[in-house]
Image (tube, helix red, strand yellow):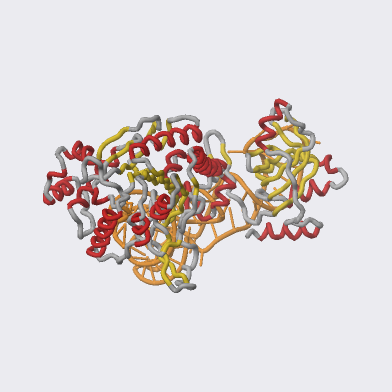
Amino acid sequence: MEPIRLEKLEELRALGIDPYPTEPFAVNTTAAEILRYYPQQKLDYKAVRLAGRLWRKRLMGKASFAVLRDESGDIQLYFQRDSFADKPDLYDIVFKKLLDLGDVIGVEGFVFTTKTGEITVHVERFRLLAKCLHPLPIEKQTEEKTYAAFTDPELRYRQRYVDLIVHLGVRELFRRRTAIVQAIRDFFNEKGYLEVETPILQPVYGGAFARPFVTHLHALDMPLYLRIANELYLKRLIVGGFTGVYEFSKDFRNEGIDRFHNPEFTQVELYVAYQDYYWMMELVEKLLETVVQRVTGGLTVKYGELELSFQAPFRRVRYYEALTEVVGQDVRTLSETQLLALLHERGLPLPEPPYERIDLIAQLFDKVVEPTFIQPTFVLDYPVEISPLAKRHRSDPSVTERFELIVAGKELANAYSELNDPLDQRARLERQAALRAAGGMEAMPLDEDFLRALEYGMPPTAGLGLGIDRLTMLLCDAPSIQEVLFFPLLRPEGSPSPTP
RNA sequence: GUCCCCAUAGCUCAGCGGUAGAGCAGCGGAUUCUUAAUCCGCGGGCCGCAGGUUCGAAUCCUGCUGGGGACACCA
């Protein structure tokens, strides 16, 4: 903390001013509201009360200007010594000397327009509401230059509160994130789907393929896993008789961290009984059209250098057909050796051994085909081997009724006609378990309760998982997932945390 | 986990073998319409940490820590 600011704190106390007062300060307007409505005189602006941070001081002799920043934005303040005739020290000492940029203050006064035409609050009374003991990296800019921009990503993420104070655009981004979630929730609610909550701590994890975080429940002396997906629980609810359920789900995956991955991330998963993946494609098109329109005001989104159009219908391509187009021959007819040669040709690394033929195909698809889909594209009919929870295709049992929605070369959503044949499901999960065992990975018992639920009969169901962080990145033109998480995971500062 | 880049004042950066600089922020003064306010004056640094090379290291080398990017992993 700044020693100078601590001294000021003491001086304030000596003057009988509590730097952290208890009394509330009720505001009756905001900076944005005044700037918007004052020119039309739609409201009475004789006694406005607003609160926020002191953002700039332009001190002159007997009268000075300042800027107040509240949640809505910035507004200029005008302080005049004559306004404090009975207590000039309030102006000369408290305002001019003891208030620092960043201090939280409440002001009361009337609105007027300066000679240069700026709408300004003439402050008649003010109160310190909370002293700020650190200097804030306040940016200053002209047309040509920006001074002291607060740009170090590490500092911005570690001290997100400072980032939010300084960058109004960052606040705007997170409002938009909330608006996206809200738009999705409204869309689902209008259709009568039920928003639910299912366990984050799970005795058996499933619904995706990823390393979990493990913890321990002392009460029952047993391991628990943070969910990597909530799929299997939502399906149990479909078995239970709900026809449409959804959940915004924080999921946890103990994998690498990069521009597109954070160990905890948010998906919304939706399950609707008596529907299939064709129906789900149309729903996703409508959902995205609605959300994008509502949040951005249009259907075209700028993402980096890209212009993305969320105008339905989206392009549809079958998995193997897309591969054939890129590779020039049908990969299903190629031997493992030929596939290896193809990977080698393109300089692609091999999957971790032990790998099977299908892993080579998937590698080709993920590295060569998927990145080419920039505009929203449904990739349909994934191979059955890599889709253990999706129903076999009604006309080709080697593929599944599954689609992924790819946008800007990245997976945004994943959906299936859900596998509801309990015997096929058991066989597929057992195969997955065997593969994992062969790969030397930790053996995870099958989720017997989930299989038992299917044995009671799950209606034919369409299911969807949609990445909220990814969607937010697209709609906010954010280059990394860290930009759309308030508190992205970083290594702790200073000494490492103790091992439990 | 591997590779590349970065770390200098509160913030943003320059300096890249000869003992540390700018702008903004800060402190003192002047100023009743400023808005990057202006004008005069001033302070501020374990140059990320530890070792090495050198007569001499912010600068070169090695290791470590933290961050960014790419790759791998993430059906």
Whole-percent x, y for residue A295 in the image: 50, 35
Q: In which quarter of the image is residue A425?
A: bottom left
Q: Which residue lies furthest to the top in this view?
A: A40
Whole-percent x, y for residue B17 in the image: 40, 57
Camera-side residue of A8 and A17 = A17
Answer yes or no: is residue A468 visible: no
Answer yes or no: is residue A91 visible: yes
Q: Which residue lies furthest to the right in this view?
A: A86
Q: In this view, does A88 lie above or below A48?
A: below
Camera-side residue of A412 and A402 = A402
Whole-percent x, y for residue A487 in the image: 50, 53
Left or right: A322 in relation to B46: left
Which residue is located at x 12 percent, y 46 percent?
A: A334
Quadrant location of the N terminus of chain A in the rendered image: bottom right
Q: Quadrant of residue B72?
A: bottom left
Left or right: A475 in relation to A101: left
Whole-percent x, y for residue A249 in the image: 46, 52
Which residue is located at x 22 percent, y 40 percent?
A: A395
Camera-side residue of A413 and A452 = A452
